[in-house]
Image (tube, grey):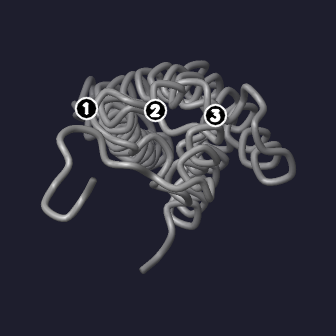
């Protein structure tokens, strides 16, 4: 079975690749929203992956922080895809003859293809980020309900590699002190009335 870390790395790498494509297309069209979405995604996703790989436990890897930037970025990407699709609807245009000359009204064909590509990659990134957002929030809420209340200030990657964190029982947390106390070599005595043969 593929680990959560590998899936996360693959999805975020794909998002970064699509953002780079949209950044290039948006730069050619001077399309501000596509440029902003691409730059913000690259400035966010790549450092998060690099920092999370080399140094665990930083605020960049916190589940709450990851949910916050994912939410902001998927809103940007659905806006980018929607606006590009709306602008691409102007494609096709129409032509008319006026005093023997033919005139074309509409966007140039090259721009139409680029807008369609921006819309497609914008929606792809939106769906990838929305899927990650929903998965992370479901797993974080399950971990929180399972007793691991620090999941919001810890990495979901760390939780997924050690799912026993916080599972000492409903409403309780599992700590190192509890583990050490329960493993002591002191004999345990039953409390209550003595059973048969016990004095």
Q: Is residue 38 left or right of residue 138?
A: right
Q: CA distance from mark 1 to mark 2?
A: 55 Å
Residue appearing at x 73%, y 39% in the figure: 48
Q: Quadrant of residue 55?
A: top right
Q: Is residue 17 visible?
A: yes
Sequence-wise, the earlier of marks 1 and 3 is 3
Q: Nearer the viewer, mark 3 or mark 2?
A: 2
Position of residue 131 relative to residue 187, above or below, is above
Residue appearing at x 31%, y 48% in the figure: 190
- Secondary structure, mark 1, is loop
Disc number at residue 89? 1
The residue labelled by disc 3 is 41
In the rendered image, the quadrant that contains the N terminus is bottom left
Sequence-wise, the earlier of marks 1 and 2 is 1
Q: Is residue 29 left or right of residue 2?
A: right
Locate residue 179, reporting x and y percent: 58, 47
The residue labelled by disc 2 is 173
For this rendering, which residue is in front, 54 or 94? 54
- Secondary structure, mark 2, is loop
Sequence-wise, the earlier of marks 3 and 2 is 3
For this rendering, which residue is in front, 120 or 17? 17
């Amino acid at each position: 079975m593929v680990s959560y870390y590998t899936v996360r790395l693959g999805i975020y790498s794909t998002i970064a690749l699509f953002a780079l494509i949209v950044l290039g297309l948006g730069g050619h069209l001077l399309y501000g929203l596509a440029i902003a979405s691409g730059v913000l995604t690259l400035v966010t996703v790549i450092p998060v992956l690099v920092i999370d790989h080399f140094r665990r436990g930083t605020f960049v890897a916190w589940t709450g922080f990851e949910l916050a930037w994912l939410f902001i970025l998927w809103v940007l990407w659905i806006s980018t895809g929607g606006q590009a699709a709306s602008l691409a609807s102007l494609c096709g245009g129409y032509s008319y003859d006026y005093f023997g000359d033919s005139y074309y009204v509409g966007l140039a064909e090259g721009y139409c293809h680029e807008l369609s590509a921006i819309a497609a990659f914008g929606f792809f990134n939106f769906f990838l980020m929305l899927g990650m957002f929903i998965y992370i929030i479901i797993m974080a809420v399950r971990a929180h309900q399972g007793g691991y209340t620090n999941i919001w200030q810890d990495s979901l990657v760390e939780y997924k590699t050690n799912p026993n964190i916080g599972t000492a029982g409903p409403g309780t947390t599992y700590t190192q002190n509890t583990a050490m106390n329960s493993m002591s070599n002191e004999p345990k005595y039953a409390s209550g009335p003595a059973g048969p043969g016990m004095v």
